Amino acid sequence: MTSRQRPVPVFDGHNDTLLRRVIAKGTDRETSFFERSTQGHVDLPRAREGGFAGGLFAMFVPSNIHQDFSKPFNPNDPKNYAELAQPEALGFTMKMAAEAYRLERASEGQVKICRNVADIRHCIDKGILAISLHIEGAEAIDTDFEALEVLHGAGLRSLGPVWSRKNAFATGVPMAFPSSPDIGPGLTDAGKALVRACNDLGILVDLSHLNEKGFWDVANTSHHPLVASHSNAHALCASARNLTDRQLDAIRDSGGLVGLNFHVGFLREDGGYSRQTPIDVLIGHLAHLVDMLGEDGVALGSDFDGCMTPNDLADAAALPKLVDAMATSGFGPELIEKICFRNWLRALERTQM
Ligand code: ZN
């Protein structure tokens, strides 16, 4: 293997860095984005070190926003899946959007909120961290789509109709294992209208967290490539959060993509939450996804700052280890670049206006 001057740039499909920063404010977990920290997975120094060039920065509103966030997320607590009221969700979304804008302003040119793919390419060339604003779970969006218009004006370029709970638009999948993703009803009429509104605005519709009926409803409603920003292969890890081969076929036929999620519970054959998960397990999912989707349909969607990653992929600075593992497993340099950033840029280009 050759040593690299600069790590391969990664444009990543999903992180929860804005949420982590918002809920750490005023606590002893609050850190500067511009200094290297051991909290969470992403800050600017670690991003630069690992080649993390930017990505879709999620604005996710947790159920029960008044919970004690110093405690680890409990996937079995029903309170964590309670429905949210729209005004409350919009208020909390503002905090995350404001955090992105504050980071951009404080960065003195080192961080940029990108509105199109040309912005992202410019950032990758210049070593500026590229933020593309994303909504994970559309509780903040009213059914007249007024908040959608305003947030689009503020830079929103992708949106997942649901997180793993029910809302006005659709029903999400629980983190069940082992389980089929075919749980619950599909999109509501408002959900189908949301997909059309996103198509019209050039906002990418994200399939991750949707149940299977909702997936097929998006497939039949949207005229954009189908994209799951942070999901894995159900054939290798039977989590309800992962995609069956039939779903992967539909994504391939649409010219879409899947971003590999680094969460151990969505990677491991036993579905276990163990950091002792070798990087080879991620390579196994990537190989299956390349098999099913082709070289243009596979990307990364780390879930940094929102998941339990393997020990060997402890934060954004560790990304070159994944790139090296791809190379050792026989992924050529062209395929590696496609997975690391080119496929995301192509998918966004085909979606945006
Ligand atoms: Zn997620």
Image (tube, rainbow, N blue to C red):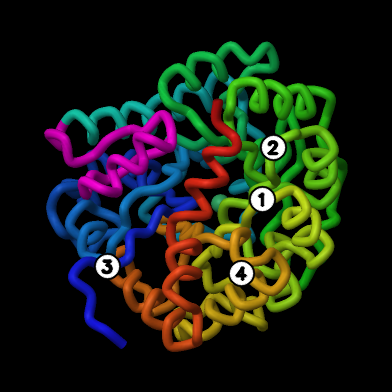
Marks 2/1 in contact by CB < 8 Å: the verdict is yes
In reply to whether residue 118 is colored magenta, the answer given is: yes
Asked whether residue 269 appears in the rendered view, the answer is: yes
Q: CA–CA distance between discs 3 and 4? A: 26 Å
Q: Is 90 placed above or below 241 here?
A: above
In reply to whether residue 23 is colored magenta, the answer given is: no
Residue visible at 31% across and 88% down in the picture: 1
Residue 284, located in which quarter of the rendered image? bottom right
Residue denoted by label 1: 256
Residue 38, located in which quarter of the rendered image? bottom left
Magenta range is 106-132
Q: Secondary structure at mark 4?
A: helix
Residue denoted by label 2: 224
The tag earlier along the polypeptide, 2 or 1, is 2
Q: Is 58 placed above or below 201 here?
A: below
Q: Secondary structure at mark 1?
A: loop
The C terminus is located in which quarter? top right
The tag earlier along the polypeptide, 1 or 3, is 3
Q: Secondary structure at mark 3?
A: loop
Mark 2 or mark 4, which is nearer to you? 2
Residue visible at 45% across and 44% down in the picture: 56
